[in-house]
Amino acid sequence: MTSKHDIDTQYNDNQTRDLDMNNIKISAKKVQVYYGDAHAIKDVDVEIQDKTVTAFIGPSGCGKSTFLRSLNRMNDTIDICRVEGEILLDNENIYDKRVDPVQLRAKVGMVFQKPNPFPKSIYDNIAYGPRIHGLAKNKAELDDIVEKSLRRGAIWNEVKDRLHAPGTGLSGGQQQRLCIARAIATEPEVLLMDEPCSALDPIATAQVEELIDELRSNYSVVIVTHSMQQAARVSQKTAFFHLGNLVEYGDTGQIFTNPQDSRTESYITGRIG
Amino acid sequence: MTQTSLFTADARTTKRNRAEKRFKAYGLTAISIGVFMLVYLLYTILSSGLGAFFQTRVTMDIPLVQEEIIKAEKGLLKTKAYKKIIANALYAELAEAGIETTMKEKELLGIISGRAPAELRSFVQENPDQIGTTVEFKLLAGSFIDGYMKGRVVRENAERSKNYSIAQLDLVDQMQKAGILKKGFNLAFITGNDASESSPEAAGFGPAILGSLAMMIVVAGCAVTLGVAASIFLEEFAPQNRFTDIIEVNISNLAAVPSIVFGILGLSVFINYLGPISGDDWIKNNSAFVGGMVLTLMTLPTVIIATRASLKAVPPSIRDAALGLGASKLQTVFHHVLPLAAPGILTGSIIGLAQALGESAPLLLIGLVLAQGASAPDSIAEFFAGPNTAMPAQIYQWSTRADPAFYERAWGGIIILLVFLLTMNILAVILRRRFERRW
């Protein structure tokens, strides 16, 4: 009975998500973020599409990470942080009083700048999310989820023989792919990535970028990056932030070849930032 | 600019090097002094206290004749009759060993502890089936004879002493040669009850060890659970504002409050206020429960500070990772943060417990001292609610008594206390290693 219901929901989900392919997943309206008295994000309006990689670029301290963190309410953990305006996920304001950030974060996964695997086994790292959200009814299902996630994280072949070795024993690049696999194990709809490659060497970066491109078929990916080349390589849409303002947002090709704003041009040509 | 050679040090460098050497020498001196003091302290403790673990006893066969015992039990002063039995047995024992003596009964009994008749009587009462047989007893020697065996009492002072005579010491020498009188390991010091002021040879540390155990159970139960819960709330859940700042500062200050202040607090809050209100047996002076609660108050700041420090040391990235996966705050804390902080929390708690174990001032203030010779509580409820004592309080008691034999007992108690503290510290190190090595 339950399983039939699950299949139905899944089916419906897939249908709606297919329809949403070119549709807006997240829509931010007049978003302001304050850290105490400091106004970190000013009047940002942005629409993030489903099944697209959106890159946030900009100089250090421009607020791109802050804005990313407000998309799954990770800023709630900072006492002095205050968010105003509306951020709609599938037309529901995530800052509504009725929204439980815990539920939201299951839908909007996040990968951090520094690989941060739990000091547990590789298996437990992946299984943690599904366990707390009750995604698996038994051990066999959990095993399936772990394998599927590790495969989608493009790390299965490297770790399949040592699933019970500590996740912290992997190399930096492997750890980051493990973290990505962990994030997608909870079946999120949006994946936020905060400079996921900044701690990685070029080879690991290439692997992660390839992975991001693959993830696009299932998720809406938002990535913050310092590397303009990376933004150009992996993203379809790019947003340029400067001093807390969203200066320009458009197709990646257009931003890099034909920026409309002089500040964008200065940044991508290396004159500011 | 003049060209200088690298082979000769210039004035500045020489001065700098000299300063460095001087500083190293200061450090080395400081450490040497510290180590010397520690060694001297250990030497003093061991040389003064080890004697308490050995006790002189007189081995003799005592025939338990039924008529004599019945007669003794009929008398008014029962132990006096048992004295007679012991004296006769000792005369017989000496004759058997070929030692001739003309000593009077009273002087002869001076060699044996004053507690011996009572000991014999309680043996007879506990083992009535042994009446009619001859039983080998190892009776305690008197404290001065014991002191003579340990070198505390010397012949030169015998003439001036009312407590022992040259004749007694001569006899003791002969008895020792004959193997009747021997110094042996004194288990009774560790397990036995405290004794009255006149018989230090029978005094034991048992009730004090049990009392400390009872208080440690209360402290471990209250201070660790309360402390860890308070720290988790303050560190992970409480908002950062003026109110929590004030709490934080006060906790740090509480850790530096003299323990006797906690004793007075316990006296006024638990005993004078809560006790009469609740009418509860447990809340009264000299119960281990109240002692434990006072020590809990004293230990809480230590536990909270240690726990908060180890919670703070857990990298925030772990919290981010868990929250980012949709774990709730509580899940994040209990699944990830707490296990990682566990070694630090354990170490802090054990150090807090060790501190509480060695505390005497607040306990003396709330009267955690047993009557001389009182035995350890015999039921679980009495264990916590009845009159009790603690190791440091007992040590203090002994150190205030006049007889120098108690001095040895006090040092012996310190050795036992130190063994407990050392064990707890080693436990803390082992637990820390074990939990940290997992990843």
Image: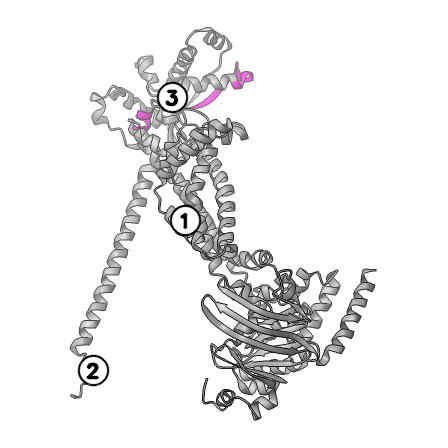
Residue at point 72%, 66% (across, down): A143
The amino acid type, in three-letter code, at marker 2 is Phe
Residue at point 18%, 81% (across, down): B8
In this picture, is A58 found above or below B407?
Answer: below
Q: Which mark is residue A66?
A: none
Residues B184 and A133: in front is A133
In this picture, is B267 found above or below B433?
Answer: above
Q: Quadrant of residue A71?
A: bottom right
Residue contact at pointers 1 and 3, CB within 8 angstroms: no
- Give the residue number, with chain letter if any, for mark 2: B7
Q: Quadrant of residue B179?
A: top left
Q: Locate residue B68, reporting x and y percent.
A: 47, 9
Q: Where the C terminus of chain B falls, by quadrant? A: bottom right
The amino acid type, in three-letter code, at marker 3 is Ala
Residue contact at pointers 3 and 2, CB within 8 angstroms: no
Looking at marks 2 and 1 on the same chain, the residue that comes earlier in the sequence is marked by 2
Query: Is disc 3 placed on a helix, strand or loop?
Result: loop
Q: Locate residue B275, reporting x and y percent.
A: 47, 29
Task: Give the residues drawn in magenta, as a range.
Answer: B126-147
- Chain bearing tag 2 is B
Q: Locate residue B75, reporting x and y percent.
A: 44, 6
On the same chain, marks 2 and 1? The answer is yes
**Label 2 neighbourhood size at 10 Å, few (<14), some (14-19), many (20+)?**
few
Q: Is residue B326 magenta?
A: no
Query: Is disc 1 placed on a helix, strand or loop?
Result: helix
- Give the residue number, with chain letter if any, for mark 3: B97
- Give the residue number, with chain letter if any, for mark 1: B251
